[in-house]
Amino acid sequence: MKKFEFLEHTADVKFQAFGKSIEKVFENSAIAMISAMTNQKIKKKIKKDLKVKGKDFESLMYNFLEEILFIMDTEAFVLGGIRKLKIDKKNFELKAELLGDSPKKYEFHLDVKAITYNEMFVREEKKNWIAQIVLDV
C-alpha cells in the first residue's frame, strides 16, 4: 500500500494519504506535507513530544499538521519521522513523538503557509484509512 499521492490542484498542494490504521494515515499525512516542501531525507536527531485535540478526525488532522508547521516555524525543527503515535478515537486526542532535525541543513522548494479544510476528509474505506488534505502554499 502506498503512503500518499499528490493530486492536481490549481494553486495549492493537494494530497491523499493512506494507512491500515487511523494512526498510520495521520503519520503518512505528516510525511506527505514535509515531502511537499523538500525531497531531502530528514535526519532524526531531535525529539519533540506533541499533543493535540480535535472535535472530529478532520479537526484533529488540521490541528496535528498545523502544530507541526508551528513547531517548524518557532523551534527550528523539521519533521523526519514519527514514533509512538496514538489516537484516542472517542476523545479525538493525539499524542506522538516527533523526530527531526534543524531546517538549516536542508533545502526547501515550497513554503506551506497553512492547512485548509477545503476538500479535507479523514475516513475509513474497506478496512483502510484515507485522508485528503489541501495545503495553502
Image: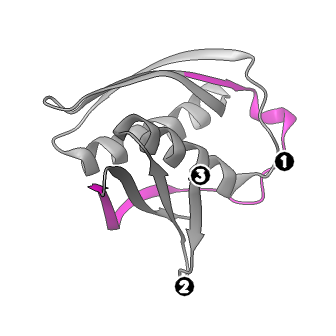
Question: Would residue 66 be seen by someone viewing this image from the given angle?
Answer: no
Residue 104: within the magenta?
yes
Label 1 sits on a secondary structure element that is loop
Whole-percent x and y of residue 28? Answer: 53, 45
Q: CA distance from mark 2 to mark 3?
A: 18 Å
Task: State the residue at coordinates (82%, 34%).
Answer: 104
Q: Which residue is mark 3?
A: 32
In this image, 85 relative to 93: left or right? right
Q: Earlier in the sequence, mark 1 or mark 3?
A: 3
Which amino acid type corresponds to the residue marked 3 in the rendered image? Answer: Ala
Q: Which mark is residue 107?
A: 1
Task: State the residue at coordinates (82%, 45%).
Answer: 40
Q: Which residue is mark 2?
A: 10
Task: State the residue at coordinates (44%, 36%).
Answer: 67
Q: Earlier in the sequence, mark 2 or mark 1?
A: 2
Label 3 sits on a secondary structure element that is helix
